[in-house]
Image (cartoon, grey):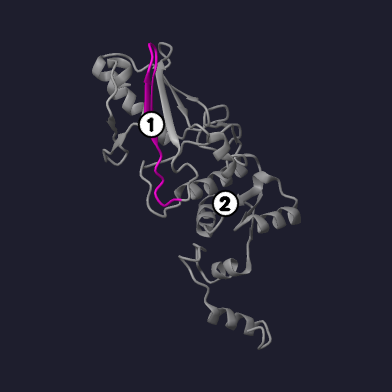
């Protein structure tokens, strides 16, 4: 925005996050034309299992129609919403409300310094994002053509796995919005395939739970569905039965003594125990 109005890019850009923090980012690229300006940064996802780690995020700003305010477009590698239940309606680019708010506030602040209306079109692109999206749940959520622009705080917490948990919540909301009453959450592809075949479930009803059983159960407690089926390997589901909400091997352990007690109560042989 500053380059568009003043004709000059800075090497680094400082923005304000929702919590008030003001991080500074080096630009990975920038381009200025007569009617638009583009800037990019490299995404750092920290220790999160996020396929966008290291991806380049590019935003292009240009004047919009008078009176339209700030509008958003999906560029290369950013998906479009096609199903109800997500934070933005079908037909809109998959850019969530919080990033939209942050971007809009930044644009409005710059426009205010110039005493002009904030009528601008914002296009977000992620080169290669369409291929990266194949490694996400976007297809099941009805997001086609690329990745989603997520985020609430602007900060990635180490091992927060927030993107995965967000996908779980979104999957449940899409299922609810499309009238499904039965969803299945699985720890992996093998168990997911088995449960889909057993109940003949549509892919929209499948939740890629991974190790985040708590992410599924806690969300469903406040956003209930008629039926939930959990599927997974024996070890992970045993840890869930023993009260663990995070089933990752580095964050929970199977209690073999408790398992032996359960087997004893079920009449298992000494060899089995």
Q: Is residue 120 visible?
A: no
Pick out the residue farthest to the bottom: 270
Question: Is 71 located above or below residue 18 in the figure?
Answer: above
How many C-alpha atoms fall within 10 Å of the one at disc 2: few (<14), some, or many (≥20)?
Answer: some
| Visible residue check, residue 154 | yes
Name the residue at 40% across, 36% down: 98
Residue 127: horizontal and vertical position, in percent? 50, 31
- Of all residues, the one furthest to the left in this rendering is 113
Q: Are discs 2 and 1 less than 8 Å apart at CB?
A: no
Q: Earlier in the sequence, mark 2 or mark 1?
A: 1
Residue 216: name its quadrant. Answer: bottom right
Q: Name which residue lies at 71% across and 57% down.
A: 194
The magenta span reads 28-48
Q: Secondary structure at mark 2?
A: loop
Q: Secondary structure at mark 1?
A: helix
State which quarter of the image contains the N terminus. top left
Left or right, 106 with reference to 124: left
Question: Image quadrant of residue 59?
Answer: top left
Residue 43 part of the magenta segment: yes
On screen, residue 210 versus residue 115, left or right, reads: right
Query: In which quadrant is the C terminus drawn?
Result: bottom right
**Which of labels 2 and 1 is toward the front?**
1
Q: Residues within 10 Å of mark 1 (few under 14, many from 20)?
A: few
Image position of 213 with respect to 206: above or below: below
* Residue on which the image places disc 1: 101
Q: Position of residue 50 (x, y in %)?
A: 48, 46
- Residue placed under numbered mark 2 in the picture: 224
Residue sitting at 47 percent across and 41 percent down? Answer: 52
Task: From this view, report whether residue 120 is shown above or below residue 233.
Answer: above
Decide if residue 224 is on the left or right side of residue 54: right
């Amino acid at each position: 925005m500053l380059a568009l109005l003043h004709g000059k890019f800075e090497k680094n850009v400082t923005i304000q996050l929702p919590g008030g923090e003001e991080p500074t980012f080096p630009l990975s690229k920038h381009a200025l034309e007569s009617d638009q300006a583009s800037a990019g940064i490299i995404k750092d996802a920290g220790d999160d299992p996020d396929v966008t780690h290291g991806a380049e995020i590019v935003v292009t700003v240009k004047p919009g129609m008078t009176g339209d305010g700030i509008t958003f477009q999906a560029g290369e590698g950013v998906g479009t919403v096609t199903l109800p239940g997500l934070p933005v309606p079908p037909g809109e680019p998959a850019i969530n409300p919080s990033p939209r708010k942050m971007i809009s506030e930044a644009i409005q602040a710059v426009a205010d310094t110039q005493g002009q209306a904030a009528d601008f079109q914002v296009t977000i692109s992620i080169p290669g994002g369409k291929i990266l999206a194949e490694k996400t749940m976007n297809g099941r959520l009805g997001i086609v053509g690329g990745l989603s622009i997520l985020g609430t705080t602007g900060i990635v917490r180490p091992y927060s796995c927030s993107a995965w948990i967000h996908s779980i919540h979104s999957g449940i909301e899409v299922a609810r919005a499309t009238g499904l009453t039965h969803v299945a959450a699985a720890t992996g592809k093998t168990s997911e395939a088995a449960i889909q075949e057993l109940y003949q479930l549509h892919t929209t009803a499948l939740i890629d739970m991974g190790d985040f059983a708590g992410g599924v159960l806690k969300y469903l407690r406040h956003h209930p569905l008629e039926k939930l089926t959990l599927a997974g390997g024996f070890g992970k589901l045993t840890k869930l039965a023993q009260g663990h909400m995070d089933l990752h091997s580095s964050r929970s352990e199977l209690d073999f003594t408790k398992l032996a007690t359960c087997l004893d109560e079920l009449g298992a042989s000494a060899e089995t125990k």
